[in-house]
Image (cartoon, coloured by chain):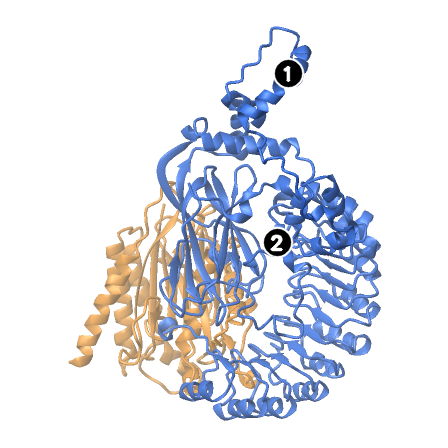
Chain colours: A blue, B orange
Amino acid sequence: MNEPLSVSTSSSSDLTTTSSSDYAEVFDLHECATTGVDVDNYFSDVLIDQYAQDVVDFSSQYGSDYSISYTALNITGRPCKYPDYGDFPETFAMRTYGDWWESAPSRLPEIRPQNNPKITAQDFIVVRFEQFVIPEKIILFETYNPGALVRIWSHDITEKWILLWEDEPHNYGPKSRKFSPPLKKMKLPTKVIRLEFNHSCLDYFTEIDGITLIGRKCNVFSQSDFLSRCRRRNRKGPILRKLESLRFRPCYKENHQDYLRDFLVNDLEKFIRESALLHDDGEKENTQLGLRDMPCEILLKIFSYLDMKSLFRMGLVCKQMYEITNHPLLYSEINLKPYWHLSSSELLRTLANRCTLLKKLDLSWCGLYGTISPTEFKKFIQQRGDNLTHLRLNSCKFLNASCMETVGIVCDNLKELSLRNYSNETNILSFSCLANLRNLERLDLFRTYIETELLLTMLENNPKLKHLNLAFCGIGVNMDEIASHISKYNRELVSIDMWKSHSLSSVGLQALSVCSHLEEVDFGWCLREEALPGESLKCLLRGCPNLKKLFLAAIRGITDRDLENIANLCPQLEQLDLMGVLGISTEKCYEILVKCKKLKLLDLSFCDHIDEAQIANWREQFPVSIKRSCVPSDFFI
Amino acid sequence: MQSLCWTTRFLSRALRNGFATLVEPHVKPRPRFVSVVCGFPKDFLESKYKLGKFGDDAWFKTQTPNADVIGVADGVGGWRSYGIDPGEFSSFLMKTCERLVHCSGFNPQRPVNLLTYSYCELLEQKKPILGSSTACVLVLHRETSTLYTANIGDSGFIVVRKGEIVHRSEEQQHYFNTPFQLSLPPPGHGHNVLSDSPESADTLSFPVKEGDVILVATDGVFDNVPVKILLDVLKEIEGENDPVKLQMTANTIALMARSLSFDSEFMSPFAINARRNNINATGGKPDDITVVLATIVA
């Protein structure tokens, strides 16, 4: 059997002070499965392969929710493009690539980065298959820029996440790939697989055509059925089984109580020695200074560099350490995103006791499959939320209307609020109490549906707003109105992302031109109705001389005149995206390369009128990464 | 001689193509299509053969457990002078319709949604796809034995039962030789390009019976072959469930349309229409030809 990988070795009880009966039960099942006797007749030797049936959750996608191009759902079913290589709309693509987003003005520092594992995940997708199997092999069909996959998790039948595979991200170059990494052997059946990605090595967006799960078929139809049968077969706990394996046969004839007392008084020592439960470390007097001799302040300083898991483990050393590791100063910033697989209501309760000075909280990605109850979260926020300045709740499955209400009422000091991926739950979630917030500097509503009215009120109430992300905010939001509100109330804005907001027109563009601090604008796929945004774009560029990132992807009306304006008015420009713009010429692109001295990224994908030979020249001549994505030429013909 | 050689090669390819896509039998006796395809591009030399395309025409047929779907689209050739391949638009439209049929939200009773969504999908492509196209989509809803149709422009269908045309699509034209069309003009040309919304599609729904013959075709067929002749051919194959025989009939219709379209003497439906509009014309109208022929079997 493979050595279990680092992340999965510790069970959830690591992060909690008390281990509940639930965990004992799960542990039981694992034992029972590893001994293999009882459960084995569930599994046949028949290998079956299945394609993904359904997408349970994902962190980002390139396409809009209502579309079928570049969206997460494309990972389901039979791969339709593999082995072709290219930028196909029939595949699943995510929102970012490379480190370009990390070097943009809107980059987001991690809360307690020491919590992150060596390989961080930037995106994830959870897919469901039709039947429970014991996974033997997983095949990922990557049809564009392969190599971003860093982890594969499986959600087994006992609702525990097991890490099946992990590796550094790589750049495999421009060819499609059928990727099947060696998996850790698993004893329990699963039908839910989670993939995690890190795009930092990639040249452009990665695209995934499909995923196959090959595994031994097992005759499990429902989870409850399996669990109840396992329970019936094996009711013994770990201690009882340990005793059994030591052939320790207590005699029950006498009074039970007396026997136990007798055992504790007389035989316990012998039992411990024989069963080697206690390590004989030698009782030599240690004259060296140990951690325990340090002053509390120093220890606190040292511990503040620990990740949360190590901190919890440290607390198991002794009482003194436990007390120090419980110190509220160590819990002023909490980031559970790297521990999404261990997050639970119980953990939240434990943390609530410790984090009396909580300032920053990141619960992103936590709570899938009900591991965190909304009530527990609400209680947590009520107890510890009033000093919160940073709150990130991206893709949290436990949020409901009353949770949101609590956040709005309690956390009135919030400077940063991140609520990504609440697009489907519009009718369940109501954000109306967010209108209470007055100190926001950053608001991230990526792929979250919000009403225009509320957003307007929020803009009005938060004059210090610096970063605003409204990408994929739905068709419901009138971006022109938002833009004119921003021009009135939020002139300190530094970055704005309106990716795929179809309602933005040149009126909105013009309004934004008064925000002279703007350094980053993303208008990708906006201005659809607008034939030629020329004048308003010029106005914006003139009004914002500090622009570093300008994304104008798929604004088909961009012309040479606009490029001329960009070249002349944006001396600070570092990233420029002109993907899918037809009406621009080679000469004007050259002009930009010459005049924008700080340019590092230029996306000219699908700009058909640009001379390919010239681009090759430019790549040698300028220190600029020029992107040229394409679909194979015979794709449409 | 050269051209004859090309023609035969394409004919045999078309035949093979038709045979390859036979409909598999189903367990439950519910109405379904037995369908075949045949067609020719207007100019063999200029067009590359690709499944689902005949020149600027495109077609698809597919099925779900619940429904059988057929669609044809005719890319508007006028875009060629703008440097735009008109086949790309129609081909994308049909391909997307086919994908949408297999999506979870597919409603067999609203074929117009297929057109609407695939038109919206055009706007979501990284690669700009410009041009315009007519389109006609038919969905057989198995449960209710009802055919739901949406048609925009001058492609269309006819349904033949007991030697008579029981249903047919209505041609939608702005004026002579200018059909309704879904279009995505290049930026800046928006105001002087005809563009009809997918919602303006003509929708019909009617019950069908076992044995009904359905012909779905682009204007290359309807402009060149008089309906009477079509009817004569179609009534021969009522109730036919042998795809080979259907294929022969489809080939006949396609070949007939092709020969008539190059016949300069023939008073084609197109020429008759032209005369109605005070344009003196005789002969057929050379065009891409797509024939999808289906019968309903239980």
Nearest to the observer: residue A71 or residue A313: A313
Q: In which quarter of the image is residue B12?
A: bottom left
Q: Nearer the viewer, residue A156 or A69?
A: A156
User: Is residue A502 left or right of B164 when viewed as pictured?
Assistant: right
| Mark in front: 2 vs 1 | 1
Q: Is residue A558 above or below residue A495?
A: below
Of the residues shown, which amino acid type is indicated by label 1?
Answer: Asn
What secondary structure is found at the residue carrying circle 2?
helix
Q: Is residue A604 visible in this depiction of the protein?
A: no
Q: Residues within 10 Å of mark 1 (few under 14, many from 20)?
A: few
- For disc 2, the chain is A
**Quadrant showing the N terminus of chain B:** bottom left
Mark seen at residue A62: none
Task: Indicate which disc, 2 or 1, sits on the residue closer to the N terminus.
Answer: 1
Give the image location of residue A349, x and y in percent.
Answer: 74, 42
Q: Nearer the viewer, residue B82 or A520?
A: A520
What number is the disc on residue A338? 2
| Left or right: B190 in relation to B166 | right
In the figure, B74 relative to A407: above or below? below
Q: Are the residues under badges 2 and 1 in a single subunit?
A: yes
Give the labeled residue for mark 1: A266
Cα–Cα gap, marks 2 and 1: 47 Å
Residue type for callout 2: Pro
Q: Which residue is drawn at 79% across and 59% down?
A: A434
Q: Specify the quadrant of the image occupied by residue B293.
A: bottom left
* Viewer-nearest residue: B52 or A80: A80
Q: How many circles with numbers are drawn on the protein?
A: 2
Q: Height in image: B33 above or below A465?
A: above
Instruction: Count neighbours of disc 2 (C-alpha within 10 A) and say few if under 14, some if 14 to 19, many if 20 or more.
Output: many
Residue B177: quadrant of the picture: bottom left
Q: Which residue is drawn at 44% across and 64% down?
A: A146
